Image (cartoon, grey):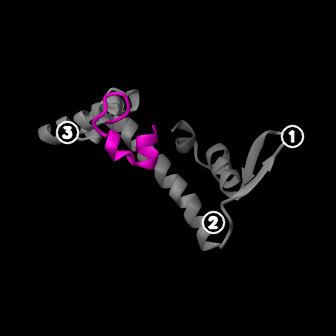
Amino acid sequence: MALTTNGFLNWKDALNKEKGFVKHASSEIHLIAMSMWNEKDRRQSTGISISNLINSDILERHRYYVKSVADVIKFLVVNELALRGTYDINEQKERSLFQNLFEYTIIRKDKKLAEC
């Protein structure tokens, strides 16, 4: 984990099996990253994109959801309203104009968005 957040600084031990790259190469975080890299490489070589692997209905719903989030943000920005809010300790919930407007849109105005 330190290698991914801070970089590698101890170059004299880089080839040491106990402390260097060999140890990092067998770490869980490295193995996961390599697995994801290999999957990306495989998709690029075959011309398959993530959007081809996902059901078109699900992809369309996700696009609609992201567009709705962007619309709420655009409304707040155009009206020079803050997105941030406050944290209500009693309810243990954050309250913000963004969250309130988005929940209002989902609950009252847009049934299609509620299904996303």
Q: Which residue is mark 1?
A: 90
User: CA separation, marks 1 and 2?
Assistant: 26 Å
Measuring 52% from the left and 53% from the top, which residue is drawn there?
68
In the displayed structure, 55 sits above or below 11; it is above
In the displayed structure, 36 sits above or below 5; it is above
In which quadrant of the rendered image does the N terminus lie?
A: top left
- Inspect the image, locate mark 3, and give the three-letter code of the amino acid beneath it: Asp
Reply yes or no: does residue 9 show up in magenta: yes
Q: Position of residue 101 (x, y in %)?
A: 67, 55
- Give the left or right position of residue 90, taking residue 40 as reference: right
Q: Which residue is mark 3?
A: 41
Measuring 68% from the left and 65% from the top, which residue is drawn there?
82
- Badge 1 local density, few (<14 within 10 Å), some, or many (20+)? few
Measuring 38% from the left and 46% from the top, which residue is drawn there?
8
Q: Position of residue 45 (x, y in %)?
A: 13, 40
* Of pointers 1 and 2, the one earlier in the residue sequence: 2
